Amino acid sequence: MIELKGLHKSYITGNNKLHVLKGLDLIIEQGELVSVMGSSGSGKSTLLNVLGILDSYDNGSYKLNNTLMSNLTEKKAAHFRNNMIGFVFQSFNLISFKNAMENVALPLYYQRVGRKTRNKIAMEYLDKMGIKDWAEHMPNELSGGQKQRVAIARAMISKPKVILADEPTGALDSTTSLEVMDLFREINKSGITMIIVTHERDISEKTNRIIQLKDGIIESDLISKN
Amino acid sequence: MFDTDKWQEIYYSLKQNKLRSFLTAFGVFWGIFMLIVMLGSGNGLQNGVTQGFGDFATNSVFIWTQRTTVEYKGFPKGRFFNYNNADITAIQKNIKNIRYLAPRLRAGGFGGGDNVIRGLNSGAFQISGDYPAMNLIDPINIDKGRFINDIDIEQKRKIVIIGTRVQEALFEPDEDPMGEYIRIQGVYFKVAGIFSSKKSGEQGDRENQGIYMPFTTLQKTYNYGDIVGFFAITAYDNVSVSKVEEETIKLLKQRHLIAPEDDQAIGHFNVEKEFKQMKGVFLGIDGLIWLVGIGTLLAGVIGVSNIMLVIVKERTKEIGIQRAIGATPVKIMSQIITESIFITAFAGYIGLVIGTGLIELVSFALIKFEVDSNMFRNPEVDFQVAVTALLILVISGAFAGFIPAKRAVSIKPIDALRSE
């Protein structure tokens, strides 16, 4: 499903070259529930951006669903992001001028699905997330947990192969965090691969595999008991 | 298909900073408004001046006599001479490409004493002896009756066609002048027609104070013998009258024993040249109007482009989110360019409507208050020009949006997402 071989990535800031990912080898199978841990600067966010085709890499290879992700045109990249990947961000990243339902329906808009159809599908997903009643609300009228549910619904609506979550619980209180994690586990059971970047131990403990990053290399890769 | 999401986003984007959106739109509005008002005024000026020409055949020339300035074949310089009836046939026979030839004689005029009498009324009027062709070279409106015809010329009929001002001076308002008699030079003439000028302003006024009679009748009445006052000549449409003018003058010089190099002896006025010169002036004015108008418009459009850049910068993160969940660069660019076109076209359209409205209002006022000016009349804007202007707006709107749109997609999605 996801196959990384000798992945290198460095940033150039002025005259300094910052080597962030130093040759990662990683295979994640379809249907896994993985968490990526590490202190800040360990390269976990960079890894997630490369996996999400939001950023490019310098060396090595990245195969998603057996397709090599390199030298993509921005159009192709957008297409892959739209069809294969769902994103969940720490700061939710909802579009402020669209209500919950429209936010969820947005990926389908880019697939040229008609407005009526996509809004109907969006309602189904909001129902699954248990926030159907807030469909007409704007993002600034929702609580953090509700916003993240909307974001998760949006990530799921295009039926992606993998959902990438970048500190999804970073802005939520512990009760809501656990609720969101339960939601993730449920989604994972339907066969969607989940990769969650976090630095909270109790979050990673809810996943089936914990990858620990340190200074751009994999320090440990543990299959956990649950 | 109407893309609700696209317009929702445009509405949101413009609503974010209403004053800024308004000022930006105003720049474009002002540009197109100025262009339209200036074009309309330019047309008004042009209409006013060309109206002074009436339906004058512009490829015409007038040729009259002056004093010779060169000694020739034993004649001294400073000699007066006259054209005669034989010149008429000679010109007709020898000069090609003449469409109309109208010899003319004039008698009286304002400044002179009263020369036309009817009962107790009298007046001083310009009296012209004309051929029927004159009405084809420098046309007038025949309001009643008819103009001079060939039989009038042949039979030297004592008839006149009088101008509206002549009618007012000699007849009571409820009187019908047709068939009545007026006395000129002691001879009674029957009124066979009433005319009004096609020209406006002072020129038209002067023409309306004129009386036309058959050329031959005037020669006889005033005892002019076979003298011809001057010639009015119109060339065929596809021929330049300047060539005809040159040939005719050469012929007349030969016939009246004038030195070929004597340019002063024969006076001539080429309407075509005059007309071309005037056209040139208007072309210049038009060019200036477009230059200034397009310049103003360009300033407005650059304003739009600038603001779009600011909007793109403000919304970098949103654009980043959209790209993360699958918006293609084309989609993002089309969104920004549509927004830019929308501002430009919308503001421009309002400018177009208000500008045209103002022009129409002025036009209406001119008619309502019966302003008859030689310089300004019937300002108007071509429908075609309006459509062209709108087209220019849409295209320039697209251009204005293009650079900001490029900027929006040139940032990597991840950098866009990170920006706050």
Image: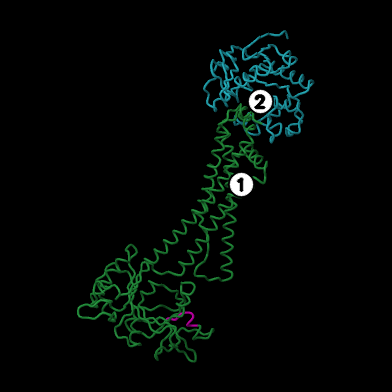
Chain colours: A cyan, B green
Report the residue marked by disc 1: B24
Identify the amino acid type marked 1: Thr
- Circle 2: element type: loop
Chain of the residue that carries numbered disc 1 in the rendered image: B
Viewed as shown, does residue B400 lie left or right of B261? right
Measured Cα–Cα span from mark 2 to mark 1: 39 Å
Q: Quadrant of the C terminus of chain B?
A: top right
Q: Is residue A152 visible?
A: no
Over which residues does the magenta segment extend? B161-167
In the rendered view, tell whether residue B282 sits above or below residue B336: below
Which quadrant of the figure contains the N terminus of chain B? top right
Residue B257, horizontal then vertical, whole percent: 23, 77
Q: Is residue A43 visible?
A: yes
Figure disc tally: 2
In the rendered structure, the answer to whether residue B263 lies left or right of residue A109 reads left
Q: Position of residue B124 (x, y in %)?
A: 45, 85
Which of the 4 image quarters holds residue A108?
A: top right
* Relative depth, front residue between A213 and B176: A213
At horizontal 57% and vertical 30% (from top left) the residue drawn is B411
Structural crowding at the residue carrying mark 2, measured as other residues with C-alpha within 10 Å and reported as few (<14), some (14–19) or many (≥20): many
Dot 1 lies on which element? helix
Q: x and y percent of residue B378 in the render?
A: 52, 65
The quarter holding residue A127 reads top right
Q: Are marks 2 and 1 in contact (CB under 8 Å)?
A: no
Q: Tell me if residue B211 is in the magenta stretch.
A: no
Q: Residue furthest front?
A: A15
Name the residue carrying label 2: A157
Q: Chain of mark 2?
A: A
